[in-house]
Amino acid sequence: MQKERAKYQPKLPKALRAAGVKVELGAPSEPATDKEEIKKLFPNTYGQPVAKIVEGDGTLNSAPLKVGVVLSGGQAPGGHNVIAGLFDALKAANKDSKLYGFLKGPGGVIKGKYKELTAEIIEPYRNTGGFDMIMSGRDKIEKPEDLAACKKNFEDMGLDGIVIIGGDDSNTNAAVLAEYLKAEGSKTVVIGAPKTIDGDMKNERIEASFGFDTACKTYSELIGNICRDATSAVKYWHFIRLMGRAASHVALECALQAHPNVTLVSEEVQAKGTTLGEIVDYIVDVIAKRSEAGKNYGILIVPEGLPEFISDIKAMIDELSAILGKDEEYIRDLPDHSERVQYLSGQLSDHSARVYSSLPVDIQEVLLRRDSHGNVPLSQVETERLLIDLVSDKIRLMQAHGGSKVKFTPLSHFFGYEGRCAAPTNFDADYCYSLGHAAAQLVRANLTGYTVNVQNLTKSSDEWVAGGVPVTMMLNMEVRKGKPAPVIKKALVELDGNPFKKFAANRESWALEDKYVFPGPIQYFGPSEVCDAPTMTLALEKSAMSNE
Protein backbone atom coordinates (compact mmCIF):
# COMPACT_ATOMS: atom_id res chain seq x y z
CA MET A 1 0.00 0.00 0.00
CA GLN A 2 2.77 2.46 0.93
CA LYS A 3 4.64 1.71 -2.29
CA GLU A 4 1.54 2.12 -4.43
CA ARG A 5 0.51 5.27 -2.59
CA ALA A 6 3.94 6.80 -3.18
CA LYS A 7 3.30 6.60 -6.93
CA TYR A 8 0.07 8.65 -6.71
CA GLN A 9 0.33 11.94 -8.61
CA PRO A 10 -1.97 14.49 -6.96
CA LYS A 11 -4.34 16.39 -9.22
CA LEU A 12 -3.93 20.16 -9.70
CA PRO A 13 -6.23 22.97 -10.86
CA LYS A 14 -5.75 23.93 -14.52
CA ALA A 15 -4.00 27.23 -13.75
CA LEU A 16 -1.37 25.53 -11.59
CA ARG A 17 -0.65 22.99 -14.33
CA ALA A 18 -0.04 25.71 -16.90
CA ALA A 19 3.47 26.50 -18.15
CA GLY A 20 2.99 30.13 -17.15
CA VAL A 21 0.88 31.57 -14.35
CA LYS A 22 0.05 35.03 -13.16
CA VAL A 23 -1.49 36.41 -10.00
CA GLU A 24 -4.49 38.71 -10.45
CA LEU A 25 -5.26 41.14 -7.62
CA GLY A 26 -8.79 42.26 -6.82
CA ALA A 27 -10.12 45.25 -4.91
CA PRO A 28 -8.75 46.23 -1.46
CA SER A 29 -10.14 44.04 1.35
CA GLU A 30 -11.21 44.70 4.93
CA PRO A 31 -12.38 42.60 7.87
CA ALA A 32 -16.08 42.26 8.67
CA THR A 33 -15.68 43.80 12.16
CA ASP A 34 -13.20 45.74 14.33
CA LYS A 35 -11.80 47.52 11.26
CA GLU A 36 -10.14 50.44 13.04
CA GLU A 37 -8.45 48.30 15.73
CA ILE A 38 -7.10 45.86 13.12
CA LYS A 39 -5.93 48.70 10.85
CA LYS A 40 -3.97 50.18 13.79
CA LEU A 41 -2.32 46.84 14.55
CA PHE A 42 -1.52 46.03 10.89
CA PRO A 43 -0.84 49.38 9.16
CA ASN A 44 1.52 47.83 6.58
CA THR A 45 -0.55 44.82 5.57
CA TYR A 46 -4.14 46.07 6.09
CA GLY A 47 -6.49 46.37 3.10
CA GLN A 48 -4.54 44.15 0.72
CA PRO A 49 -6.46 42.74 -2.28
CA VAL A 50 -7.65 39.16 -2.66
CA ALA A 51 -5.33 37.25 -5.02
CA LYS A 52 -6.32 34.78 -7.74
CA ILE A 53 -3.91 32.53 -9.68
CA VAL A 54 -4.74 32.21 -13.38
CA GLU A 55 -3.07 30.91 -16.51
CA GLY A 56 -0.74 33.61 -17.76
CA ASP A 57 2.31 34.62 -19.69
CA GLY A 58 4.87 33.30 -17.20
CA THR A 59 6.17 36.74 -16.23
CA LEU A 60 6.13 35.98 -12.49
CA ASN A 61 9.54 36.19 -10.81
CA SER A 62 11.56 33.23 -12.10
CA ALA A 63 14.82 34.02 -10.29
CA PRO A 64 16.08 31.33 -7.91
CA LEU A 65 14.32 31.74 -4.55
CA LYS A 66 15.13 30.62 -1.03
CA VAL A 67 11.96 29.70 0.85
CA GLY A 68 11.37 28.27 4.32
CA VAL A 69 8.48 26.10 5.47
CA VAL A 70 7.29 25.23 8.99
CA LEU A 71 4.58 22.94 10.39
CA SER A 72 2.75 24.53 13.31
CA GLY A 73 0.38 22.99 15.86
CA GLY A 74 -1.34 19.60 15.84
CA GLN A 75 -0.85 17.17 12.98
CA ALA A 76 -3.30 16.97 10.08
CA PRO A 77 -3.23 14.54 7.14
CA GLY A 78 -1.78 16.15 4.01
CA GLY A 79 0.89 18.39 5.52
CA HIS A 80 3.64 16.58 3.65
CA ASN A 81 1.86 17.20 0.35
CA VAL A 82 1.78 20.94 1.01
CA ILE A 83 5.57 20.78 1.34
CA ALA A 84 5.87 18.58 -1.78
CA GLY A 85 3.67 20.95 -3.81
CA LEU A 86 5.68 23.95 -2.62
CA PHE A 87 8.95 22.23 -3.53
CA ASP A 88 7.78 21.08 -6.97
CA ALA A 89 6.42 24.52 -7.91
CA LEU A 90 9.58 26.34 -6.79
CA LYS A 91 11.81 23.92 -8.71
CA ALA A 92 9.57 24.12 -11.82
CA ALA A 93 9.99 27.91 -11.87
CA ASN A 94 13.76 27.70 -11.31
CA LYS A 95 15.70 24.51 -10.63
CA ASP A 96 18.17 26.47 -8.46
CA SER A 97 15.51 27.51 -5.92
CA LYS A 98 15.98 26.05 -2.44
CA LEU A 99 13.45 24.98 0.21
CA TYR A 100 14.38 24.85 3.90
CA GLY A 101 12.32 23.04 6.53
CA PHE A 102 12.35 24.58 10.02
CA LEU A 103 12.42 21.82 12.62
CA LYS A 104 9.88 21.17 15.39
CA GLY A 105 7.54 24.03 14.58
CA PRO A 106 7.81 27.79 15.15
CA GLY A 107 10.40 27.13 17.90
CA GLY A 108 12.76 26.05 15.10
CA VAL A 109 12.12 29.32 13.26
CA ILE A 110 12.99 31.34 16.39
CA LYS A 111 16.11 29.27 17.12
CA GLY A 112 17.21 29.03 13.48
CA LYS A 113 17.04 25.21 13.42
CA TYR A 114 16.43 23.98 9.87
CA LYS A 115 17.57 21.66 7.10
CA GLU A 116 17.48 21.95 3.33
CA LEU A 117 14.69 19.82 1.87
CA THR A 118 15.96 18.04 -1.22
CA ALA A 119 14.09 15.79 -3.66
CA GLU A 120 15.66 12.76 -1.93
CA ILE A 121 14.36 13.86 1.48
CA ILE A 122 10.86 14.76 0.27
CA GLU A 123 10.23 11.76 -2.00
CA PRO A 124 9.44 9.13 0.72
CA TYR A 125 6.94 11.49 2.37
CA ARG A 126 4.69 12.16 -0.63
CA ASN A 127 1.04 11.24 0.03
CA THR A 128 1.84 10.18 3.61
CA GLY A 129 0.20 11.30 6.83
CA GLY A 130 1.95 12.91 9.76
CA PHE A 131 4.34 15.82 10.16
CA ASP A 132 7.43 13.67 10.70
CA MET A 133 9.40 15.08 7.75
CA ILE A 134 10.31 18.17 9.82
CA MET A 135 8.10 17.65 12.91
CA SER A 136 5.80 20.21 14.50
CA GLY A 137 5.50 22.32 17.65
CA ARG A 138 3.16 24.73 19.40
CA ASP A 139 5.43 27.71 20.07
CA LYS A 140 4.19 31.15 19.03
CA ILE A 141 6.22 33.87 17.35
CA GLU A 142 4.83 36.88 19.20
CA LYS A 143 7.33 38.32 21.70
CA PRO A 144 9.47 41.22 20.36
CA GLU A 145 12.66 39.22 20.92
CA ASP A 146 11.22 36.23 19.01
CA LEU A 147 10.20 38.40 16.06
CA ALA A 148 13.66 39.99 16.01
CA ALA A 149 15.32 36.53 16.15
CA CYS A 150 13.24 35.38 13.16
CA LYS A 151 14.18 38.47 11.15
CA LYS A 152 17.89 37.88 11.85
CA ASN A 153 17.64 34.19 10.93
CA PHE A 154 15.85 35.04 7.67
CA GLU A 155 18.49 37.64 6.81
CA ASP A 156 21.33 35.24 7.57
CA MET A 157 19.67 32.62 5.31
CA GLY A 158 18.81 35.13 2.58
CA LEU A 159 15.20 33.89 2.76
CA ASP A 160 12.75 35.29 0.19
CA GLY A 161 9.70 33.79 1.86
CA ILE A 162 8.38 31.48 4.55
CA VAL A 163 5.25 29.33 4.42
CA ILE A 164 3.58 28.65 7.79
CA ILE A 165 1.32 25.59 7.70
CA GLY A 166 -1.13 25.80 10.60
CA GLY A 167 -4.59 26.58 11.95
CA ASP A 168 -6.30 29.84 12.84
CA ASP A 169 -3.81 30.80 15.57
CA SER A 170 -0.82 29.93 13.37
CA ASN A 171 -2.19 31.95 10.44
CA THR A 172 -2.85 34.89 12.79
CA ASN A 173 0.75 34.46 13.92
CA ALA A 174 1.80 34.55 10.25
CA ALA A 175 0.02 37.90 9.87
CA VAL A 176 1.85 39.32 12.93
CA LEU A 177 5.19 38.14 11.53
CA ALA A 178 4.40 39.53 8.06
CA GLU A 179 3.49 42.92 9.53
CA TYR A 180 6.67 43.04 11.62
CA LEU A 181 8.94 42.06 8.72
CA LYS A 182 7.34 44.59 6.36
CA ALA A 183 7.67 47.37 8.95
CA GLU A 184 11.34 46.44 9.40
CA GLY A 185 12.03 46.51 5.66
CA SER A 186 12.75 42.77 5.43
CA LYS A 187 12.50 41.11 2.01
CA THR A 188 11.06 37.88 3.49
CA VAL A 189 7.36 37.42 2.71
CA VAL A 190 5.02 35.27 4.84
CA ILE A 191 2.28 32.97 3.52
CA GLY A 192 -0.01 30.73 5.63
CA ALA A 193 -1.79 27.47 4.73
CA PRO A 194 -5.13 26.47 6.38
CA LYS A 195 -4.70 23.31 8.48
CA THR A 196 -6.81 21.72 11.22
CA ILE A 197 -8.72 18.45 11.50
CA ASP A 198 -11.29 20.33 13.64
CA GLY A 199 -12.65 21.95 10.47
CA ASP A 200 -13.13 25.33 12.17
CA MET A 201 -10.80 27.38 9.96
CA LYS A 202 -13.16 28.17 7.11
CA ASN A 203 -15.10 31.12 5.74
CA GLU A 204 -16.41 32.41 2.43
CA ARG A 205 -12.87 32.35 0.97
CA ILE A 206 -11.48 29.22 2.67
CA GLU A 207 -13.90 26.37 1.99
CA ALA A 208 -12.16 23.75 4.14
CA SER A 209 -9.14 23.29 6.35
CA PHE A 210 -6.96 20.44 5.19
CA GLY A 211 -6.95 17.19 7.18
CA PHE A 212 -10.64 17.43 8.12
CA ASP A 213 -11.66 15.13 5.26
CA THR A 214 -9.19 12.36 6.15
CA ALA A 215 -9.71 12.56 9.92
CA CYS A 216 -13.50 12.39 9.64
CA LYS A 217 -13.37 9.47 7.22
CA THR A 218 -10.97 7.65 9.58
CA TYR A 219 -13.24 8.23 12.60
CA SER A 220 -16.36 7.35 10.58
CA GLU A 221 -14.84 4.01 9.60
CA LEU A 222 -14.21 3.24 13.30
CA ILE A 223 -17.71 4.39 14.28
CA GLY A 224 -19.24 2.26 11.52
CA ASN A 225 -17.26 -0.73 12.77
CA ILE A 226 -18.61 -0.14 16.28
CA CYS A 227 -22.17 0.22 14.92
CA ARG A 228 -21.74 -3.20 13.31
CA ASP A 229 -20.33 -4.61 16.54
CA ALA A 230 -23.25 -3.17 18.54
CA THR A 231 -25.81 -4.88 16.29
CA SER A 232 -23.84 -8.12 16.57
CA ALA A 233 -23.34 -8.25 20.35
CA VAL A 234 -26.69 -6.48 21.05
CA LYS A 235 -25.77 -5.61 24.63
CA TYR A 236 -23.48 -2.56 24.71
CA TRP A 237 -23.97 1.19 24.57
CA HIS A 238 -20.84 2.81 23.10
CA PHE A 239 -20.12 6.41 24.18
CA ILE A 240 -17.56 7.89 21.75
CA ARG A 241 -15.74 11.19 22.28
CA LEU A 242 -14.32 12.85 19.17
CA MET A 243 -11.85 15.69 18.72
CA GLY A 244 -13.26 19.20 18.43
CA ARG A 245 -12.88 21.52 21.41
CA ALA A 246 -14.14 24.77 19.93
CA ALA A 247 -16.54 23.41 17.31
CA SER A 248 -18.53 20.24 16.59
CA HIS A 249 -17.75 19.89 12.87
CA VAL A 250 -16.03 16.51 13.33
CA ALA A 251 -18.92 15.06 15.38
CA LEU A 252 -21.50 16.37 12.91
CA GLU A 253 -19.64 15.04 9.85
CA CYS A 254 -19.24 11.61 11.47
CA ALA A 255 -22.96 11.61 12.34
CA LEU A 256 -23.82 12.34 8.71
CA GLN A 257 -21.55 9.53 7.57
CA ALA A 258 -22.42 6.77 10.07
CA HIS A 259 -25.89 7.66 11.53
CA PRO A 260 -25.22 6.87 15.23
CA ASN A 261 -28.21 6.92 17.59
CA VAL A 262 -27.29 10.07 19.52
CA THR A 263 -24.97 12.91 18.50
CA LEU A 264 -24.54 15.92 20.75
CA VAL A 265 -23.69 19.18 18.98
CA SER A 266 -22.07 21.74 21.30
CA GLU A 267 -23.35 24.76 19.37
CA GLU A 268 -26.96 23.59 19.65
CA VAL A 269 -26.55 22.90 23.37
CA GLN A 270 -25.24 26.45 23.85
CA ALA A 271 -27.90 28.09 21.66
CA LYS A 272 -30.72 26.37 23.57
CA GLY A 273 -29.14 26.91 26.99
CA THR A 274 -29.41 23.16 27.61
CA THR A 275 -28.32 22.06 31.08
CA LEU A 276 -26.29 18.99 31.95
CA GLY A 277 -29.37 17.43 33.54
CA GLU A 278 -31.40 17.96 30.36
CA ILE A 279 -28.68 16.30 28.26
CA VAL A 280 -28.67 13.30 30.61
CA ASP A 281 -32.49 13.11 30.51
CA TYR A 282 -32.44 13.11 26.69
CA ILE A 283 -29.87 10.31 26.53
CA VAL A 284 -31.74 8.23 29.14
CA ASP A 285 -34.99 8.73 27.20
CA VAL A 286 -33.40 7.34 23.99
CA ILE A 287 -31.85 4.43 25.91
CA ALA A 288 -35.20 3.61 27.56
CA LYS A 289 -37.18 3.77 24.31
CA ARG A 290 -34.67 1.52 22.54
CA SER A 291 -34.76 -0.86 25.50
CA GLU A 292 -38.56 -1.06 25.28
CA ALA A 293 -38.11 -2.07 21.65
CA GLY A 294 -35.72 -4.83 22.75
CA LYS A 295 -32.58 -2.90 21.76
CA ASN A 296 -30.22 -2.66 24.73
CA TYR A 297 -27.43 -1.24 22.59
CA GLY A 298 -26.59 1.95 20.75
CA ILE A 299 -23.97 4.52 19.76
CA LEU A 300 -23.51 8.02 21.17
CA ILE A 301 -21.13 10.66 19.75
CA VAL A 302 -19.93 13.61 21.82
CA PRO A 303 -17.45 16.37 20.87
CA GLU A 304 -14.62 16.76 23.39
CA GLY A 305 -15.41 20.44 24.00
CA LEU A 306 -19.06 19.91 25.03
CA PRO A 307 -18.71 20.90 28.74
CA GLU A 308 -17.66 24.44 27.78
CA PHE A 309 -20.98 24.90 25.94
CA ILE A 310 -23.33 23.61 28.70
CA SER A 311 -24.94 26.60 30.41
CA ASP A 312 -24.90 25.43 34.04
CA ILE A 313 -21.41 23.90 33.79
CA LYS A 314 -20.11 27.15 32.24
CA ALA A 315 -21.67 29.18 35.08
CA MET A 316 -20.27 26.78 37.70
CA ILE A 317 -16.78 26.93 36.13
CA ASP A 318 -16.83 30.76 36.12
CA GLU A 319 -17.73 30.76 39.83
CA LEU A 320 -15.17 28.05 40.59
CA SER A 321 -12.42 30.04 38.79
CA ALA A 322 -13.16 33.10 40.92
CA ILE A 323 -13.08 31.05 44.15
CA LEU A 324 -9.84 29.28 43.19
CA GLY A 325 -8.34 32.65 42.28
CA LYS A 326 -8.43 33.71 45.92
CA ASP A 327 -8.65 30.44 47.89
CA GLU A 328 -6.87 27.77 45.80
CA GLU A 329 -4.04 27.16 48.28
CA TYR A 330 -6.44 26.91 51.24
CA ILE A 331 -8.73 24.49 49.37
CA ARG A 332 -5.83 22.27 48.27
CA ASP A 333 -4.53 22.11 51.86
CA LEU A 334 -7.80 20.77 53.26
CA PRO A 335 -7.20 17.19 54.50
CA ASP A 336 -9.72 15.29 52.36
CA HIS A 337 -12.04 15.60 49.40
CA SER A 338 -15.26 15.75 51.42
CA GLU A 339 -14.02 18.86 53.24
CA ARG A 340 -13.09 20.50 49.93
CA VAL A 341 -16.58 19.81 48.57
CA GLN A 342 -18.17 21.11 51.79
CA TYR A 343 -16.14 24.33 51.64
CA LEU A 344 -16.98 24.90 47.95
CA SER A 345 -20.68 24.21 48.55
CA GLY A 346 -20.72 27.18 50.89
CA GLN A 347 -18.96 29.42 48.37
CA LEU A 348 -20.76 28.46 45.15
CA SER A 349 -24.31 29.60 44.37
CA ASP A 350 -26.96 27.00 45.20
CA HIS A 351 -27.40 25.90 41.58
CA SER A 352 -23.66 25.69 40.87
CA ALA A 353 -23.11 23.79 44.14
CA ARG A 354 -25.71 21.22 43.01
CA VAL A 355 -24.05 20.91 39.59
CA TYR A 356 -20.60 20.46 41.18
CA SER A 357 -21.82 17.88 43.69
CA SER A 358 -23.56 15.92 40.89
CA LEU A 359 -20.23 15.30 39.15
CA PRO A 360 -18.19 12.13 39.74
CA VAL A 361 -15.50 12.54 42.44
CA ASP A 362 -12.54 12.22 40.04
CA ILE A 363 -13.94 15.04 37.87
CA GLN A 364 -14.58 17.19 40.95
CA GLU A 365 -10.89 16.81 41.78
CA VAL A 366 -9.75 17.65 38.23
CA LEU A 367 -11.72 20.90 38.41
CA LEU A 368 -9.88 21.99 41.57
CA ARG A 369 -6.64 22.49 39.62
CA ARG A 370 -5.85 25.43 37.38
CA ASP A 371 -3.63 25.39 34.30
CA SER A 372 -0.68 27.69 33.59
CA HIS A 373 -3.07 30.38 32.32
CA GLY A 374 -5.11 30.26 35.52
CA ASN A 375 -8.04 28.46 33.89
CA VAL A 376 -9.96 25.49 35.26
CA PRO A 377 -8.81 22.57 33.01
CA LEU A 378 -12.19 21.66 31.55
CA SER A 379 -10.42 20.06 28.57
CA GLN A 380 -9.17 17.29 30.89
CA VAL A 381 -12.73 16.15 31.61
CA GLU A 382 -13.38 12.88 29.76
CA THR A 383 -16.84 13.87 28.58
CA GLU A 384 -17.91 10.38 27.53
CA ARG A 385 -17.08 8.99 31.00
CA LEU A 386 -18.89 11.90 32.68
CA LEU A 387 -22.03 11.14 30.66
CA ILE A 388 -21.77 7.39 31.33
CA ASP A 389 -21.57 8.05 35.09
CA LEU A 390 -24.53 10.46 35.12
CA VAL A 391 -26.67 8.31 32.82
CA SER A 392 -25.89 5.20 34.93
CA ASP A 393 -26.90 7.09 38.11
CA LYS A 394 -30.16 8.23 36.53
CA ILE A 395 -31.04 4.71 35.30
CA ARG A 396 -30.22 3.21 38.73
CA LEU A 397 -32.46 5.82 40.37
CA MET A 398 -35.31 4.98 37.96
CA GLN A 399 -34.84 1.27 38.68
CA ALA A 400 -34.83 1.87 42.45
CA HIS A 401 -38.23 3.53 42.10
CA GLY A 402 -39.56 0.67 40.00
CA GLY A 403 -39.83 2.79 36.87
CA SER A 404 -37.38 1.03 34.64
CA LYS A 405 -36.09 -2.35 33.58
CA VAL A 406 -33.51 -0.86 31.25
CA LYS A 407 -30.31 -2.84 30.74
CA PHE A 408 -27.44 -0.40 30.33
CA THR A 409 -23.92 -1.72 29.77
CA PRO A 410 -21.74 1.18 28.61
CA LEU A 411 -18.31 1.21 26.95
CA SER A 412 -16.28 4.37 26.40
CA HIS A 413 -13.98 5.37 23.53
CA PHE A 414 -11.93 8.41 22.55
CA PHE A 415 -10.98 8.79 18.89
CA GLY A 416 -8.36 11.50 18.60
CA TYR A 417 -4.82 10.80 17.53
CA GLU A 418 -6.06 7.92 15.36
CA GLY A 419 -7.21 10.46 12.77
CA ARG A 420 -4.46 13.08 12.85
CA CYS A 421 -1.76 11.21 10.93
CA ALA A 422 -3.70 8.87 8.65
CA ALA A 423 -2.58 8.62 5.01
CA PRO A 424 -4.46 11.50 3.36
CA THR A 425 -7.51 10.78 1.23
CA ASN A 426 -7.29 11.60 -2.46
CA PHE A 427 -9.18 14.81 -1.66
CA ASP A 428 -6.67 15.91 1.00
CA ALA A 429 -3.68 14.71 -1.06
CA ASP A 430 -4.88 16.78 -4.06
CA TYR A 431 -6.02 19.78 -1.98
CA CYS A 432 -2.77 19.98 -0.02
CA TYR A 433 -0.57 19.58 -3.09
CA SER A 434 -2.56 22.42 -4.72
CA LEU A 435 -2.15 24.59 -1.60
CA GLY A 436 1.62 24.06 -1.72
CA HIS A 437 1.82 24.87 -5.44
CA ALA A 438 -0.30 28.00 -4.94
CA ALA A 439 1.80 29.13 -1.94
CA ALA A 440 4.89 29.05 -4.18
CA GLN A 441 3.17 31.35 -6.70
CA LEU A 442 2.20 33.83 -3.97
CA VAL A 443 5.83 33.93 -2.81
CA ARG A 444 6.97 34.42 -6.42
CA ALA A 445 4.47 37.32 -6.67
CA ASN A 446 6.10 38.85 -3.53
CA LEU A 447 2.83 38.87 -1.58
CA THR A 448 2.93 38.77 2.23
CA GLY A 449 0.39 38.36 5.02
CA TYR A 450 -1.81 36.00 2.96
CA THR A 451 -3.38 32.57 3.60
CA VAL A 452 -3.34 30.44 0.47
CA ASN A 453 -6.75 29.15 -0.64
CA VAL A 454 -8.37 26.82 -3.17
CA GLN A 455 -12.07 27.19 -4.03
CA ASN A 456 -14.73 25.21 -5.95
CA LEU A 457 -13.67 22.11 -3.97
CA THR A 458 -16.86 20.13 -4.64
CA LYS A 459 -16.16 20.25 -8.39
CA SER A 460 -13.48 18.35 -10.31
CA SER A 461 -9.93 19.52 -9.65
CA ASP A 462 -9.89 21.01 -13.19
CA GLU A 463 -12.37 23.60 -11.93
CA TRP A 464 -10.60 24.40 -8.66
CA VAL A 465 -9.47 28.02 -8.33
CA ALA A 466 -6.36 28.82 -6.29
CA GLY A 467 -5.30 32.14 -4.80
CA GLY A 468 -4.72 33.93 -1.53
CA VAL A 469 -6.73 35.74 1.15
CA PRO A 470 -5.20 38.63 3.14
CA VAL A 471 -5.14 37.41 6.75
CA THR A 472 -6.24 40.86 8.01
CA MET A 473 -9.50 40.32 6.08
CA MET A 474 -10.28 37.30 8.31
CA LEU A 475 -9.36 38.87 11.66
CA ASN A 476 -11.57 40.05 14.50
CA MET A 477 -10.76 41.15 18.06
CA GLU A 478 -11.31 38.64 20.87
CA VAL A 479 -10.25 38.57 24.51
CA ARG A 480 -7.27 36.25 24.96
CA LYS A 481 -5.50 35.92 28.32
CA GLY A 482 -7.53 38.86 29.59
CA LYS A 483 -6.59 41.25 26.76
CA PRO A 484 -8.16 42.04 23.37
CA ALA A 485 -6.15 40.35 20.60
CA PRO A 486 -6.52 39.96 16.82
CA VAL A 487 -7.46 36.38 15.84
CA ILE A 488 -9.01 34.57 12.91
CA LYS A 489 -12.56 33.85 13.99
CA LYS A 490 -13.27 30.13 14.45
CA ALA A 491 -16.13 28.85 12.31
CA LEU A 492 -18.68 27.07 14.51
CA VAL A 493 -21.44 24.73 13.31
CA GLU A 494 -24.21 26.89 11.87
CA LEU A 495 -27.57 25.67 13.13
CA ASP A 496 -29.30 27.12 10.06
CA GLY A 497 -26.75 25.57 7.69
CA ASN A 498 -27.49 22.59 5.44
CA PRO A 499 -25.25 20.06 7.26
CA PHE A 500 -26.97 20.60 10.64
CA LYS A 501 -30.43 20.75 9.02
CA LYS A 502 -29.82 17.38 7.35
CA PHE A 503 -28.79 15.92 10.71
CA ALA A 504 -31.72 17.49 12.61
CA ALA A 505 -34.23 16.18 10.06
CA ASN A 506 -33.02 12.61 10.59
CA ARG A 507 -31.90 12.34 14.20
CA GLU A 508 -35.22 11.10 15.59
CA SER A 509 -35.32 8.09 13.27
CA TRP A 510 -31.55 7.50 13.74
CA ALA A 511 -32.10 7.50 17.52
CA LEU A 512 -34.76 4.80 17.65
CA GLU A 513 -34.06 2.71 14.54
CA ASP A 514 -30.84 1.06 13.41
CA LYS A 515 -30.11 3.21 10.37
CA TYR A 516 -26.37 2.78 10.71
CA VAL A 517 -24.10 3.29 7.72
CA PHE A 518 -20.79 1.44 7.52
CA PRO A 519 -18.40 3.72 5.57
CA GLY A 520 -15.53 1.22 5.64
CA PRO A 521 -11.89 2.17 5.15
CA ILE A 522 -10.74 5.13 3.05
CA GLN A 523 -10.63 4.18 -0.65
CA TYR A 524 -7.55 5.37 -2.53
CA PHE A 525 -8.07 3.43 -5.79
CA GLY A 526 -11.29 3.01 -7.71
CA PRO A 527 -14.20 5.11 -9.04
CA SER A 528 -13.75 8.87 -8.62
CA GLU A 529 -17.19 9.32 -7.00
CA VAL A 530 -15.98 7.08 -4.16
CA CYS A 531 -12.28 7.93 -3.97
CA ASP A 532 -12.31 11.68 -4.59
CA ALA A 533 -15.54 12.62 -2.78
CA PRO A 534 -15.31 15.54 -0.34
CA THR A 535 -16.90 15.48 3.12
CA MET A 536 -20.69 15.52 3.37
CA THR A 537 -20.35 18.80 5.27
CA LEU A 538 -18.67 20.49 2.31
CA ALA A 539 -21.04 18.92 -0.22
CA LEU A 540 -24.09 20.06 1.77
CA GLU A 541 -22.65 23.53 2.32
CA LYS A 542 -22.27 23.83 -1.43
CA SER A 543 -25.76 22.31 -1.92
CA ALA A 544 -24.28 19.46 -3.93
CA MET A 545 -26.50 16.97 -2.12
CA SER A 546 -30.25 16.90 -1.57
CA ASN A 547 -31.75 17.37 1.88
CA GLU A 548 -33.98 14.33 1.53
Image (cartoon, rainbow, N blue to C red):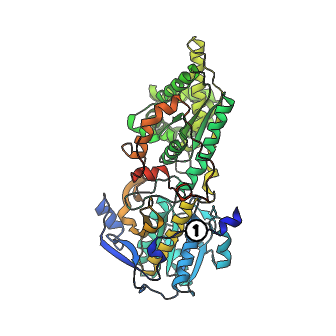
Between 340 and 363, which is closer to the camera in this rendering? 363
Q: Can residue 161 be seen from the camera position used here? A: yes
Q: Where is residue 338 in the image (x, y as percent from the top left)?
A: 61, 26
Q: For label 1, count other residues whose C-alpha is less than 10 Å away and answer few (under 14), some (14-19) or many (20+).
A: many
Q: In this view, does 288 lie above or below 375?
A: above
Kindly identify the residue that appears in the image at 40 percent across and 55 percent down: 489
- In the current view of this chain or complex, which residue is farthest to the top? 402
Question: In the picture, residue 270 is in which quadrant?
Answer: top left
Percent from the top left, x then y, of residue 473? Answer: 35, 64
Which quadrant of the figure has residue 236?
Answer: top right
For mark 1, what is the residue? Answer: 81
How far across and how far down the image is residue 10, in percent?
56, 68
Quadrant where the C terminus sits is top left
Q: In which quarter of the image is residue 26?
A: bottom left
Amino acid type at mark 1: Asn
Residue at horizontal 38%, vertical 62%?
Answer: 205
Examine the rendered structure and indicate whether residue 89 appears above or below residue 75: below
Quarter of the N terminus within the rendering: bottom right
Residue found at x 47% / y 40%: 265
Taking depth in this image into account, of 256 and 173 the one nearest to the observer is 256
Mark 1: secondary structure: helix
